[in-house]
Image: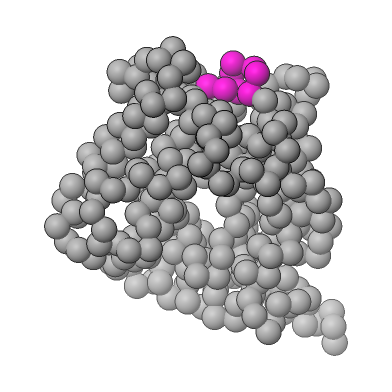
Amino acid sequence: MLEKEIPTTLQRIAENNIRTLQAYNIDITDVEKNREKSFDANQRYFLMKLTGRMLEHLDDNDYRSYFESIDENNCEKTEYISELTEDGNIALLLVKPDMYHIYDSFREFLEDNGFQILYEADKILDIETYEKIYHEKIYGENFCEDFREIPKSIVRKLCPQRIMLLTESPSRLMVFTDPQNRYKDSNLPDGFSKDFKGRQGIQDNATMRGSIIYQEAKRLGFNTLENPILANALDPLHVYRNLIEDPKSPLDKHLPMEDRLLQYTGAGVHASKNNEIRGDLGALCTEDELQEILQNKKFLQDLNQKYRN
């Protein structure tokens, strides 16, 4: 890949985002020039995207059961997930569409750090899957709050553009285990996130976000978004570029000004925490895939046990 060549995946996301804004009657030139119009458009897209599906649940007063349910009508799926996660030694990584073009680098990272991949596949998320994975970021910890208050927090200002990025474009799913069982006193998802995920915009060769993602994001220009294709792919509503200039936005102020956009554009992966792993496996994997992952895990456990003996 040439130094500044924009990956095909990002080019397609940019094109899709332009069509989406046109479909929602959002004027790109308005959001570029006016911060309030940018945030208003952000909120309008968010509510229209979600309430079109969620109105039937608003009077239910039980969001948690809806979003955390794995699949109430599929006992086999639930049983596979329970067996997979009972020893705490299984983890899930989703390479997002903006880093999909280098997903091989994440596989190499896992293997170089002693992890064994049990299953790997392309995934295209729809809005339902996005909601199940990120429900607390969207709806907050209090699932009974007034739905109309959802867009007001800073974190939730990020969700609309993340929906544009993560849905309808390819991501790469990797489910893996640790044959050394280094986190047997806790659990692999939390241990991996703590030691290997890293923070966006912070260079650290020991972590994914600090090495693979940081280097690729800087190479392509995620920290400036000067390229219009990248801008339309990653910040079509101009929200991130407005946030870094907003003194009331605390999320990016620990980074130097030239890298503050990486707080929003430099995540690149979703790594499930332990309290998320069951729901994420249920949302992202079919019953057949879960069965295959379980078989692979048992095979590797037996193989590693024979090797140790």
Is residue 58 left or right of 207 when viewed as pictured? left
Q: Is residue 161 above or below residue 80?
A: above
Q: Nearer the viewer, residue 243 or 270?
A: 243
Task: Point out the image quarter for the N terminus.
Answer: top right
Q: Residue at x 43, y 40 (%)?
A: 157
Is residue 305 left or right of 71 when viewed as pictured? right
Single out the residue that lies furthest toward the bottom. Answer: 309
Residue 293 lies in quadrant: bottom right
Estimate the x, y position of residue 91 in percent, counting from the top left: 61, 65
Estimate the x, y position of residue 164 in percent, counting from the top left: 45, 33
Q: Nearer the viewer, residue 228 or 286?
A: 228
Q: Is residue 237 above or below residue 269?
A: above
Estimate the x, y position of residue 259 in percent, counting from the top left: 71, 35
Task: Point out the image quarter for the C terminus.
Answer: bottom right
Magenta highlight on residue 147: no
Is residue 2 in sight in this rendering? yes
Residue 4 lies in quadrant: top right
Q: Residue at x 44, y 25 (%)?
A: 35
Colouring of the image = one colour
Q: Residue at x 34, y 72 (%)?
A: 75
Q: Is residue 244 above or below residue 33?
A: below
Q: Nearer the viewer, residue 132 or 168?
A: 132
Counting the numbered discs, the total is 0
Q: Residue at x 63, y 34 (%)?
A: 261
Is residue 285 left or right of 64 when viewed as pictured? right
Secondary structure mainly formed by the magenta segment: helix
- Magenta stretch in the rendered image: 225-232
Is residue 132 in sight in this rendering? no
Single out the residue that lies furthest toward the top. Answer: 29
Estimate the x, y position of residue 227 in percent, counting from the top left: 64, 17
Q: Nearer the viewer, residue 295 or 3?
A: 3
